Amino acid sequence: MARRLVALTERSYQSANKTALITDSHHGKTGADGQDGSYLCELLVGQGYTVHGLVRHHSEVHSQKPSRRMGTGAAVQHHYGDVLDPFSLIKILRLASPDEVYHLAAQSHVGLSFSTSSYTSDVDALGTLRVLEAIVALGMEKRVRFYNACSSEVFGDVKERVQNENTPFNPRSPYAVSKLYSYYTTVNFRDQGVFAVNGILFNHESPRRGMDFVTRKISRAVALIHHGRRCVLTLGNLNSYRDWGHARDYVRGMWLMMQQPEPEDFVLATGETHSVRKFVEEAFRMIGIDIEWRGKGVSEVGVDASTGRLLVQTDPALYRPLDVGYLHGSPQKAKEVLGWKPEITFQQLVREMVMADIRALEDGSDLRAIEGPQL
Ligand code: NDP
Ligand code: GDR
């Protein structure tokens, strides 16, 4: 490609009156918006940014009660669009004229990507290419900074005990392969002179996590059980390990990456890893229940140690064709270069998620999981 792009080092970057476009933002009307987009909106609005959000249209939007999740709704200008539609990207970029683009939009469920591999690749891999190409097509590449939401899933079947920016990639799902495409596409545009960075983020959760990710499935089931509802938590692989942090900490890291003098890729992680089993135990402990595990493999169950009541079961259908068994990140580079470190501990995260789901059931704001096959 014969594009002449400026040397990034020659730019000065002002911190005031900036405009950001997030390709997945807080919708303000339903719960059907992205976890990270919502926290990032809050952060940027708090810093005085003008924030534009690209959101997909949902037919049920107008019949829902306004979200009470946060107060940024009015401060964020939303535009309907889709990363599958390049024309919508061009129109929104032209209208927003952003200094920073945070590309978060994705089909983000790893398990689902096995049954929607072509769609996932279109959104997650080509979607990233479309956003970058739209920036260049509009001649905005000299001033726009671009953040790509890459993922620790690209490490896949890891050999190293702790993963960092130099760990070889070994993706194990259509999602991870697509994110690896997005990673190299971002590097490729950076090599042509665009300020483009990859955040290689390990799992981060919050009370706003989608209902079919494992942490939220657990916290919501614990809340239901606490309220005396009949509920058995059904899970897949209890023995996979994840480095779980809090989304609020991680969006701060995204923003810091975009303020650096030079574009570079960073891992964000807590440096701790825990099994799904441990998350289950910790979550039930928040409501005073000790889990005792009985049986083995797919017939293993978790019962209330004091009453013997069945609380957790496993279902082979929830095991993935391929899973990533162990992820444990090193945030060393982010600490040294960005001055970033996570503030919210694993125990605090579990507590916040369980308590938020308990409160949501009490005050009626619980957004019921959509009926359908479990993931
Ligand atoms: P969510 O699934 O909560 O949010 C994804 C968002 O992308 C949703 O708002 C969704 O909109 C939107 N989206 C999906 N498809 C399209 C499309 N075709 N066009 C426009 N928007 C679309 O993800 P998270 O907030 O957890 O993650 C944000 C990003 O970070 C994702 O790219 C994810 O893959 C990545 N990531 C997440 C990590 C995590 O642990 N949370 C770790 C590493 C990476 P809608 O509401 O309409 O479905
Ligand atoms: P992950 O998150 O695949 O790491 O991707 P998820 O919470 O879906 O799974 C974590 C681990 O838990 C195991 N597991 C289950 N998972 C789900 N969803 N449902 C279950 O019932 C269940 N039982 C066990 C999984 O097998 C897996 O090992 C998340 C997403 O946010 C990605 O977008 C992001 O890139 C990565 O984190 C980093």
Image: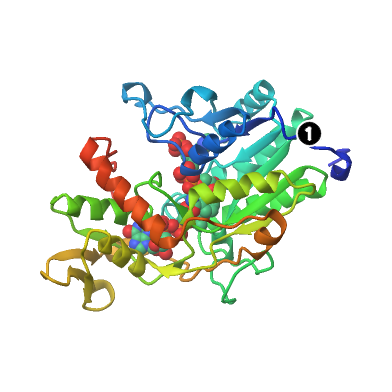
| Residue 364 picture location, percent across and down | 23, 35
| Residue 240 picture location, percent across and down | 41, 69
| Residue 101 picture location, percent across and down | 66, 36
Label 1 C-beta lies within 8 Å of the nearest ligand 1 atom: no
Q: Which residue shows up at 48% across the image and 71% down it?
A: 326
| Residue 276 picture location, percent across and down | 37, 66
Whether residue 170 is visible, yes or no, is yes
Query: Which kind of residue does numbered mark 1 sit on?
Result: Arg
Q: In the drawing, does residue 47 fall left or right of residue 298?
A: right
Whether residue 107 is visible, yes or no, is no
Q: Which residue shows up at 25% across the image and 47% down it?
A: 358
Q: In the drawing, does residue 55 fall left or right of residue 332?
A: left
Q: Which residue shows up at 31% across the image and 52% down it?
A: 354
Relative vertical location of residue 90 with respect to residue 114 in this rendering, above or below: above
Q: Which residue shows up at 83% across the image and 42% down it?
A: 1
Q: Give the image quarter of residue 360.
A: top left
- In the picture of the structure, the residue carrying the numbered disc 1 is 143
Q: Nearer the viewer, residue 231 or 247?
A: 247
Q: Nearer the viewer, residue 295 or 90?
A: 295
Relative vertical location of residue 280 with respect to residue 74 in this rendering, above or below: below
Q: How many marks?
A: 1
Relative vertical location of residue 321 with respect to residue 360 in this rendering, above or below: below
Pick the quarter of the image with the C terminus: bottom left
